[in-house]
Every structure is written in structure tokens, then in C-alpha cells.
Image (tube, rainbow, N blue to C red):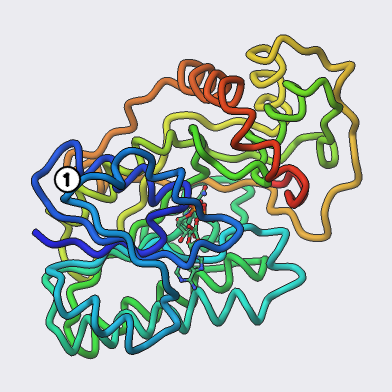
Amino acid sequence: MRLLVTGGAGFIGSHYVHHVLSTTDDHVTVLDALTYAGSLENLGPELRSNRLTFVEGTILDPDLVDDLVKTHDAVVHLAAESHVDRSFLAGGHFLTVNVLGTQLLLDAARRHRVGKFVHVSTDEVYGPLPEGTAAEDAPLRPTVPYAASKAASDLVALSAYATHRVPVCVTRSSNNYGPRQHPEKVIPRFVTKLLKGERIGLHGRGEHVRNWIHVSDNATGIDLVLRHGTPGEVYNLGGGTDLTNRQLTEHILRVCGASWDSVDYIQDRQSNDLRYAMTWAKAARLGYHPRRDFEDGLTETTDWYRAKSDRWTPLHRNAGSSVP
Ligand code: NAD
């Protein structure tokens, strides 16, 4: 299969590309604009593979998108603006990239009759759940501009199935962690600051609850949905670990060999959903199961940041706040 992966030089995208190259004979083309969040280093030695082609460009370029989609059998769409805090200041840009970009890809997928289109989304579209869990048919109640743009793009993608029978599947995963994540996101931000001997800031009292999925489990889930998912369906992909941010901080302090003396409690951000939670029974029926143990995954992730300070030190200067 010839697979077009948008956003493949980003965090999850690069893990997904590695997963495909190491588990299949498929050819992968990555389309990525190499924004502040993308890097060719994320693709590493795979760039020399004759099964990987890298194209630098934006999903907002309809001619480029058309040219690429027409020579591929399937699209896995991860390119997006992905950081909640940045969306507070740039809602219009998030809508343009995340919604219009998705529409342009879907238009090309319809014209060229691609075999499958996987749109990669997030549990944040369900909004905060004080209790209970969201299945795939739960109402979408996003509360921050990032999540609103992702919810809109999910609906655009599903409407392309309903209207034109573009064979779309949507995946919604929880909070990813693992090597190569940009240090604007909470786990790498806390880890890299502690490794530098700096203090970290925990919002509010650290009471917010997030579900954590290792990025390799998400890559596996996305690929299962690509190969076995039913068009028109949404698949939640959860991880095995629910933690308050205070519990998360406790884990990070332990693996970094630091103590609560390094933590400042800082004012909560202007909008911060208290709790996300979802079920993933539908993906389980495709064979999905989160396999990575959180403590092991966090230790491995911390070891990666410890060994790669040359990668993240330059990024620190531009990193946002610590909200997951
Ligand atoms: P990321 O910010 O690390 O990577 C995004 C990639 O998209 C970057 O390589 C960037 O250069 C590229 N990109 C941005 N704008 C582009 C454009 N106009 N054209 C082409 N490429 C462009 O994000 P991530 O954490 O890897 O997330 C990937 C996808 O997964 C996103 O759609 C995100 O909404 C979704 N998601 C992320 C998480 C998470 O915890 N990180 C959870 C659920 C869903």
C-alpha cells in the first residue's frame, strides 16, 4: 500500500511512520510543513529508507495535496496545530489548519477515491466529564479553541463519509506521552526542567485528571483502524492510566530523582477541563489494547530526554506553559 501520512515529522506522526515501516512493506510519503512542532530529526535514519519519501509542504496547498493524494491508496491525517495554550492566542489559525486543512485533504480523497482516510483526533472533543466515561457517540462539548477546532474537523471528516462516501475513520486518543514530544507539553516540559535543575509549575492544586496513552499504543491503534476500521466510524483509543496532574507530577519527580521542593503551585490557566475519560470497547473489538505500562514508559521517556539534551534545549526557549 502507498500511504500518505500528514504531520509525519511531528511527535505522534513520526512514531506512526516508524510503526508502519517496521511492521509492514508499505511505502510511506510524509507531508509536513515543518512548523516549530515538526522536525526531520524525528524521522531519523528512516529518512534513508527507500520506502519513505518526505515532502515539505502544507496541507493548505490544494494543488500539492491533490498531486500527492492521487498517487496514494490511503491517507492518515495527523497534521494539526496541537497545543491548547497556543490556541488561546491563535484560534483563527487553529481553525484554518485543523479544519480547512482537513477539508482540502478530504476533497482530494473524494476526487481520487482513496481506499481509506484516517482522521486522527482527541478525547478533548468530548469536553470535561465530572464523572462517567464518553463512548464514541457521546456529545461533543469542547471548551478550548484547540478542542473546538478538532471537533469541527471530526464533523467535517464524518460528513465527507455521509455525503460522498469518502471511507473515513476517526480516531480519538487520550493524552500521549513518549520520546520526541515537544517540550511545550507537560511531561517533557516537567522532565526537561527537572533534568536542568529548574523548578516546575503545577496549575491549581493539580486536581485535573487525564488519561495517559504511550505514543506507541496510539500508533498501533491508528494502524488497526486504518486496516480494519469500518468507514464512517469513530474509534476511541485510551491508555491504561488515569492520573490527576498531582499524581503525574509525583511520578515525574520520582523518575527524575527530584522532590516536591522543586514544585510551585501556579494560577490555573483561563480554561482547564477538570477531567477527561472515555471507553474504547469499539477499538478493542479490532484488537486494540494499550500495552505499555505507565511507569516503564515514563522511565524510558525520561531516559530519552536525559540522553538527548541537544534536541530539546533549543526548543525550550519557545516552549509554552505546562498544561497537558
Ligand atoms: P505535533 O504538534 O507534535 O505535530 C504536528 C505536526 O503537524 C508537526 O510535524 C507540524 O510540522 C505538522 N503541521 C502543522 N501544520 C501543518 C500544515 N499546515 N501542513 C502540514 N503539516 C503541518 O502534534 P502531535 O502531538 O504529534 O499530534 C498529532 C495529531 O494527533 C494532531 O492531529 C493532534 O490533534 C492529535 N492528537 C494529539 C494528542 C497528544 O496527546 N499529543 C492526543 C490526541 C490527538
**Which quarter of the figure is the C terminus placed in?**
top right
**Quick one: label 1, few (<14), some, or many (20+) residues within 10 Å?**
some
Give the SS element for disc 1: loop
Picture layout, residue 299 above or below residue 102: above
Picture layout, residue 38 above or below residue 148: above
For this rendering, which residue is in front, 292 or 109? Answer: 109
Name which residue type carries label 1: Leu
Q: Does 79 sit left or right of 16 as displayed?
A: right
Where does the image place residue 319, in percent across and percent down from the top left?
73, 49
Where does the image place residue 173, in percent across and percent down from the top left?
42, 49
The residue that appears at 36% across and 85% down in the rendered structure is 104
For this rendering, which residue is in front, 197 or 83? Answer: 197
Q: Does 287 sit left or right of 86 as displayed?
A: left
Where does the image place residue 24, in percent across and percent down from the top left?
11, 43
Picture layout, residue 64 above or below residue 290: below
Q: Does 149 sit left or right of 235 as displayed?
A: right
The residue that appears at 8% across and 46% down in the rendered structure is 25
Instruction: Say which residue label 1 marks.
Output: 286
**Which quarter of the figure is the N terminus placed in?**
bottom left
Q: Does 168 sit left or right of 199 as displayed?
A: left
The residue that appears at 77% across and 35% down in the rendered structure is 206
The residue that appears at 41% across and 76% down in the rendered structure is 59
